[in-house]
Image (cartoon, grey):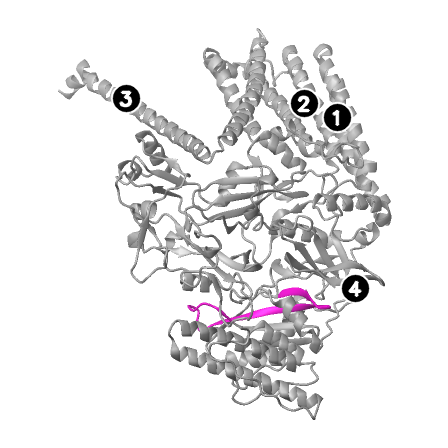
């Protein structure tokens, strides 16, 4: 019965229907998958275009798009046509008769399959290979655009007499074109060989005539093209000698000029001859001559391209290398100093005679008043715990340093933006609505005076002096502008991946904000973004696009996405500038500044290349690495090696609305000129920089690090001394984290300048300038070699960027940073003070060891921070000073300097009992200590006035008592001095100031 049923033809119907349904499902799934992939690609493309358009940089997007598309199509078509044409020729020229061999019999079955599908197979193979060729060309958009828009450097190389622009703009593109031609020839050869073999043009199992005449002719042409292109490659390789890295220098050496260069010239000629022989083989149809030519080229490349240069190096150069290489080293020195812009470094001899005397106190006070004691790394915890306000706000791991004009005086501030950090939210609150519509932005700047002195800049305090914070009396930056500044931070380094902002008409605010008047316990505030930045997402079409882009259906479904909504994305300032200027290398340290009532992120952009002839190549990461370095912004070259660098662009990103502005800084830079012609209107003129922004621009750290790295070796300009390396310097290790280099520090310095005088030249102190500073030690030693600083004041057009080096004598024994740190930590007075303080469960941490020229010597200053436990923020407890062979410690820098001077003073201070300092004043010279006490008295009177105005009678009385104690101690010291110097001197009592009048009034 079952057999009858199985034989029933009607049983086939369900199976057929099942197969049809399966086929339909597969087709449907394929269509849906293809549609989803297409929608995903389109959403990524279109939302990227919308982002560029929202910032006003559509021209950048379109230029990059059409350049890459054009390169892809042109080179992809060349590759596809070359491969397809050669495959077609091989098929058309197939032999009509093939010998009956097992090989050909076995191939018959494949030919039977391929012949009906040959058109699709040839076309598909050509297109597939063309896609790879086009993709490789598309990635060369930088080389292509620079070749099309190259500029002249106005300087020629010393060997080929070609403008440097040829090496920077032209040579990389020429190399790509030649390499592409060789790749086309090889791929076409392989494709045509496969067709010839399949259709009998290549017969491997016959003793003679293994290649048909057509195959031989075709292979000869393709091999001739390849060898001819290789000849072009040899010719271009001659110019690469000026950029090849060797064991001694980057660039041409004696062996290169006398062995490698002639070899490459000869190989170029041999390659041309060999190519001609291959072309002749089309007619002569014998491989003898072409094979001999190819063998000669290979043998020559080994003998004269590899062995002969080794022989010259071993037997001619190495025995007298210093003499042979001297001219080449000299050209490398000149090129490197020019490429890194260190040719004009002002090197001055400096003796560093730290002569201490009592009358130096005023000069030391003035020179050290602005020393930054607030360590940008160690005080982060204090910033967060004191000013963070909420767990979902945070500041950078290493705070920034900037300067502001406060009460007519430039002050250095340690500052950070209170950015949104969603990782601080409770896990229960991390839903889509909160993450993307409520917690959308940070709020406000936090700033402290770097020298730990209050706004009046008179005396140093024992705790952080806030310039900007949440308290009502912490509004120094807010008060710089009549209406304050826009505090909301929608674009920052820790901003969310995207936020949906904008409320519906007549809707309510939902974005969490800080109230402008300070945050009271339990108080909250909401706001709505009203900036120009962001992409509108009100339409269903855009909702779908962004839902696909971010993989989030709530963008379509949520009622909080309305007709007025915008989506903010790509919000990291560094990433934003990289997108609108992808040809820039960015400094790793963007920093915020308040400019015209808005928080602006300021970024430095560099033009770099690794093609500057004869200049020394170096790893960008290696040159910029130190104990504070974060990830670098390097991205414009295939490797991180460079041998040319300019700070070409200053960029800003508005922290509220994301507006990006690019300003030309080094307008003479040829690379910048080329990119400005490629992207017209994208980079504004330097003259367009607002004056209010100019005061916050500074010399960039990564450029200075690269320059100090190269100058450590290239301060030597004599080729013989350079070769011997006996004067080489190095950046010292950070004494706090000895495994990494010491970072540069921003200080107000008093650089030594030389002025004409009647008796010759006399070093005189110049006015303090905002500088970026570092030091060198001799290679392999820990004594100090030199102090280096660069003027970082962009408003000083004449001196900005001037690098000054104070070079110590070779025989000098001045301590370097590590020795100075050891000197400080091993000093008995320092150890006693720290031991008394840390006799308990107290966590201590040493701050940055700062070096600065003071008086006639170099002074080291190091703060010591402490906290009760791991949870408490570090606060400044002591300042330690090393000057010459003396070490001092105090709770303030003034006290530490007094301690240093006290060690050499002729008349020590005798503490008076019961004084304002409790009889524990630090020892120092009498006039200096008296001045310190009078300053403290003045501060106490000022504080008493403030407390009286607030009605705090008890505090007012206490401050008056402190002030009277300070004056009593000061008078006692002066009486002691008068008695010491003049026994007949009589005591003259000083009037006690009234309760409403301070000594300074």
Give the side of residue 578 with respect to residue 5, left or right.
right
Give the side of residue 216 with respect to residue 866, left or right.
right
Q: Quadrant of residue 297?
A: top right
**Relative image position of residue 477 (x, y in whole percent):** 48, 56
Between marks 1 and 2 in the image, the one whose residue lies nearer the viewer: 2
Residue 463 shows in this picture: yes
Q: Which residue is mark 2?
A: 226
Could you say whether the residue bearing mark 4 is in a helix, strand or loop? loop
Could you say whether the residue bearing mark 2 is in a helix, strand or loop? helix
Q: Residue furthest bottom?
A: 984
Given contact means CB atoms under 8 Å apart, are the residues at marks 3 and 2 in contact?
no
Q: Earlier in the sequence, mark 4 or mark 2?
A: 2
Q: CA distance from mark 3 to mark 1?
A: 60 Å
Q: Which residue is mark 4?
A: 809
Residue 397 shows in this picture: no
Q: Which residue is mark 1?
A: 295
Magenta stretch bounds: 850-876
Neighbor class of circle 4 (other Cα within 10 Å; few <14, some 14-19, many 20+) is some
Q: CA distance from mark 1 to mark 4?
A: 61 Å
Give the side of residue 569 with respect to residue 456, left or right.
left
**Above-or-below relation of 128 to 423:** above
Q: Residue furthest left?
A: 1
Q: CA distance from mark 1 to mark 2?
A: 15 Å
Q: Which residue is mark 3?
A: 24
Neighbor class of circle 1 (other Cα within 10 Å; few <14, some 14-19, many 20+) is few
**Relative image position of residue 276 (x, y in whole percent):** 75, 17
Could you say whether the residue bearing mark 1 is in a helix, strand or loop? helix
Given contact means CB atoms under 8 Å apart, are the residues at marks 3 and 1 in contact?
no
Neighbor class of circle 2 (other Cα within 10 Å; few <14, some 14-19, many 20+) is many
Give the side of residue 484 with respect to residue 27, left or right.
right
Between marks 1 and 4 in the image, the one whose residue lies nearer the viewer: 4
Q: Quadrant of residue 901?
A: bottom right
């Amino acid at each position: 019965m079952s057999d009858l049923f199985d034989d029933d033809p009607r049983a086939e119907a369900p199976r057929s229907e099942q197969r049809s349904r399966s086929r339909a499902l597969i087709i449907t799934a394929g269509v849906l998958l293809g549609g989803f992939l297409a929608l995903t690609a389109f959403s990524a493309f279109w939302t990227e275009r919308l982002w560029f358009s929202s910032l006003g940089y559509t021209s950048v997007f379109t230029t990059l798009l059409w350049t890459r598309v054009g390169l892809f199509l042109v080179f992809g078509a060349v590759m596809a046509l070359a491969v397809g044409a050669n495959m077609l020729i091989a098929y058309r020229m197939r032999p009509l008769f093939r010998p009956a061999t097992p090989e050909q019999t076995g191939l018959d079955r494949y030919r039977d399959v391929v012949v009906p599908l040959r058109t699709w197979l040839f076309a598909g193979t050509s297109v597939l290979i063309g896609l790879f060729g086009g993709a490789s060309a598309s990635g060369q958009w930088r080389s292509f655009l620079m070749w099309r828009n190259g500029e002249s450097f106005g300087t020629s190389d010393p060997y080929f007499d070609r403008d440097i622009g040829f090496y920077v703009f032209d040579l990389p593109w020429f190399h790509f074109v030649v390499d592409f031609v060789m790749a086309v020839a090889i791929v076409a050869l392989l494709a045509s060989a496969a067709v010839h073999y399949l259709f009998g043009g290549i017969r491997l199992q016959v003793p003679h005539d293994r290649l048909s005449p057509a195959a031989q002719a075709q292979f000869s042409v393709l091999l001739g093209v390849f060898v001819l292109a290789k000849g072009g490659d040899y010719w271009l390789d001659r110019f690469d000698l000026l950029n090849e890295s060797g064991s001694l220098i980057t660039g041409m050496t004696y062996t290169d000029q006398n062995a490698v260069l002639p070899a490459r010239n000869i190989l170029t000629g041999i390659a041309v001859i060999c190519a001609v022989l291959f072309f002749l083989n089309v007619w002569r149809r014998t491989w003898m001559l072409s094979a001999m030519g190819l063998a000669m080229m290979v043998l020559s490349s080994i003998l004269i391209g590899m062995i002969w240069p080794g022989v010259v190096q071993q037997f001619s150069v190495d025995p007298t290398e210093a003499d042979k290489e001297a001219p080449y080293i000299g050209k490398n020195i000149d090129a490197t100093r020019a490429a890194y812009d260190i040719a004009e470094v002002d090197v001055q001899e400096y003796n560093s005679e730290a002569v201490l005397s009592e009358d130096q106190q005023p000069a030391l006070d003035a020179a050290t008043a602005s020393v930054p004691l607030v360590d940008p790394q160690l005080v982060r915890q204090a910033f967060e715990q004191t000013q963070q306000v909420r767990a979902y706000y945070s500041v950078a791991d290493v705070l920034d340093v900037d300067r502001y004009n406060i009460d007519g005086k430039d002050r250095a501030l340690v500052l950070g933006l209170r950015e949104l950090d969603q990782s601080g939210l409770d896990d229960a609150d991390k839903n889509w609505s909160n993450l993307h519509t409520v917690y959308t932005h940070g709020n406000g700047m936090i700033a402290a005076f770097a020298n730990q002195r209050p706004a009046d800049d008179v005396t140093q305090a024992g705790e952080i002096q806030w310039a900007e914070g949440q308290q009502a009396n912490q509004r120094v930056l807010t008060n710089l502008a009549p209406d304050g500044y826009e505090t909301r931070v929608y674009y920052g380094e820790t901003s969310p991946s995207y936020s949906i902002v904008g409320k519906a008409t007549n809707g309510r605010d939902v974005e969490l904000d800080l109230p402008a008047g300070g945050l009271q316990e339990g108080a909250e505030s909401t706001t709505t973004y009203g900036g120009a930045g962001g992409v509108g997402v009100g339409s269903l079409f855009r909702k779908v696009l962004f839902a696909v882009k971010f993989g989030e259906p709530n963008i379509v479904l949520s009622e909080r996405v309305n007709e007025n909504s915008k989506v903010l994305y790509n919000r990291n300032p560094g990433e934003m500038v990289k997108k609108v200027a992808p040809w820039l290398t960015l400094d790793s340290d963007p920093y915020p500044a308040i400019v015209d009532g808005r928080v602006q992120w300021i970024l430095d952009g560099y033009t770099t290349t690794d093609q500057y002839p004869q200049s020394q190549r170096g790893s960008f990461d290696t040159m910029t690495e130190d104990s504070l370095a974060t990830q670098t912004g390097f991205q414009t070259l295939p490797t991180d090696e460079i041998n040319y660098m300019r700070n070409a662009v200053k960029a800003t990103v508005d922290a509220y609305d994301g507006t990006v502005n690019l300003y030309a800084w080094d307008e003479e830079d040829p690379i910048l000129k080329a990119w400005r012609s490629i992207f017209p209107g994208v980079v504004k003129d330097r003259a367009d920089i607002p004056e209010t922004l100019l005061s916050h621009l500074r010399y960039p750290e990564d450029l200075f690090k690269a320059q100090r790295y190269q100058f450590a070796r290239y301060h030597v300009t004599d080729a013989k001394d350079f070769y011997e390396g006996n004067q080489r310097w190095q950046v010292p290790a950070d004494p706090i984290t000895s495994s990494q280099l010491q970072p540069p520090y921003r200080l107000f310095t008093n650089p030594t300048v030389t002025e004409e005088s009647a008796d010759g030249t006399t070093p005189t102190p110049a006015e303090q300038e905002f500088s970026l500073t570092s030091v060198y030690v001799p290679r392999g030693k820990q004594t100090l070699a030199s102090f280096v600083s660069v003027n970082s004041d962009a408003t000083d057009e004449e001196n900005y960027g001037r690098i000054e080096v104070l070079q110590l004598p070779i025989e000098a024994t001045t301590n370097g940073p590590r020795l100075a740190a050891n000197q400080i930590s091993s000093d008995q007075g320092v150890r006693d003070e720290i031991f008394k303080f840390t006799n308990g469960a107290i966590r201590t941490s040493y701050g940055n060891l700062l070096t600065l020229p003071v008086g006639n010597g170099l002074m080291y200053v190091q703060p010591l921070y402490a906290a009760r436990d791991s949870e408490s923020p570090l606060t400044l407890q002591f300042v330690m000073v090393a000057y010459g062979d003396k070490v001092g410690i105090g709770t303030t820098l003034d006290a530490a300097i007094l301690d240093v001077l006290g060690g050499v003073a002729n008349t020590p201070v005798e503490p008076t009992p019961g004084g304002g300092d409790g009889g524990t004043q630090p020892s120092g010279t009498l006039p200096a200590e008296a001045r310190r006490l009078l300053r403290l008295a003045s501060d106490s009177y000022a504080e008493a006035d403030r407390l009286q105005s607030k009605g705090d009678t008890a505090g007012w009385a206490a401050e008056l008592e402190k002030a009277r104690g300070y004056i009593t101690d000061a008078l006692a010291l002066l009486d002691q001095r008068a008695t010491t110097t003049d026994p007949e001197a009589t005591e003259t009592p000083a009037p006690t100031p009234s309760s409403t009048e301070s000594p300074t009034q």
